[in-house]
Amino acid sequence: MPYFERESVLYQRIAATAAVTVIGMVGPTPPALPQGTYGVLLDAAEPLAREWSVLVLTPRFGAALVAHDRMEVEPTAATLEAGRLFDGGWSFRRDDALHEMVRSRGQLGDRLPRAALLVLDDVLGRTRELPATPGETRGEAAEHAAEGGPSDRGF
């Protein structure tokens, strides 16, 4: 809850532009979620409780950031927050975002309201069969060039 409260303005901005926004968290659902946002309660013992994911998917664009909290802290860090360690990856490939969205929908589906499922399924249905766009592959090539070669993004 403290992380949600600290970033609530950002969540409001995301929800204002997204077809649907899903926030999963351990603990009580915040009393007031932004319009178009659905909260999913996670059990502290389930794997999703230690995952921080941001997924963006449209028929022509996708981005994914998926990080798993290692439940470890760098001993020399100045603060607990600065020292938290994560394993994860990121991608601006629509196919990676599609894969992660299908995975998340499968894990959360029975806990989401029907309205959220209808929007998610609509986006997934419109996205699944479309090929990657030329801009996506050009963007990936530029990313690799800037990094000096292929990245280890975890996808």
Image (cartoon, rainbow, N blue to C red):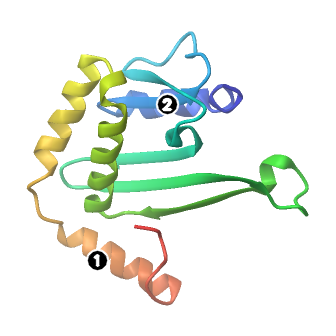
- Residue 41 vertical position relative to residue 99 in the rendered view, above or below: above
- Report x, y in % for residue 49: 56, 37
- Report x, y in % for residue 143: 43, 77
Quarter of the rendering containing residue 60: bottom left
- Residue 31 vertical position relative to residue 37 in the rendered view, above or below: above
**Secondary structure of residue under mark 1:** helix
- Report x, y in % for residue 39: 46, 22
User: On the rendered structure, is 154 left or right of 2?
Assistant: left
Disc 1 designates what residue? 138
| Residue drawn where x is 49% and y is 76% of the image | 152
* In this rendering, the label closer to the viewer, 2 or 1: 2
Q: Amino acid at mark 1?
A: Arg
Q: Of all residues shown, which one is farthest toward the left?
A: 129
**Neighbourhood count class around disc 1 (C-alpha, 10 Å): few under 14, some 14–19, many 20 upward:** few
User: On the rendered structure, is 133 left or right of 112?
Assistant: left
Quarter of the rendering containing residue 78: bottom right
| Residue drawn where x is 14% and y is 52% of the image | 128
Circle nearer the N terminus (2, 1): 2
User: On the rendered structure, is 117 left or right of 89?
Assistant: left
Find the distance from the CA under tag 2 to the CA under tag 1. 33 Å
**Neighbourhood count class around disc 2 (C-alpha, 10 Å): few under 14, some 14–19, many 20 upward:** some
Q: Nearer the viewer, residue 35 or 74?
A: 74
| Residue drawn where x is 12% and y is 42% of the image | 125
Q: Quadrant of the C terminus?
A: bottom left
Disc 2 designates what residue? 24
Q: Of all residues shown, which one is farthest toward the front?
A: 45
The answer to whether marks 2 and 1 mark residues whose Cβ atoms lie closer than 8 Å is: no
| Residue drawn where x is 67% and y is 33% of the image | 3
Quarter of the rendering containing residue 10: top right
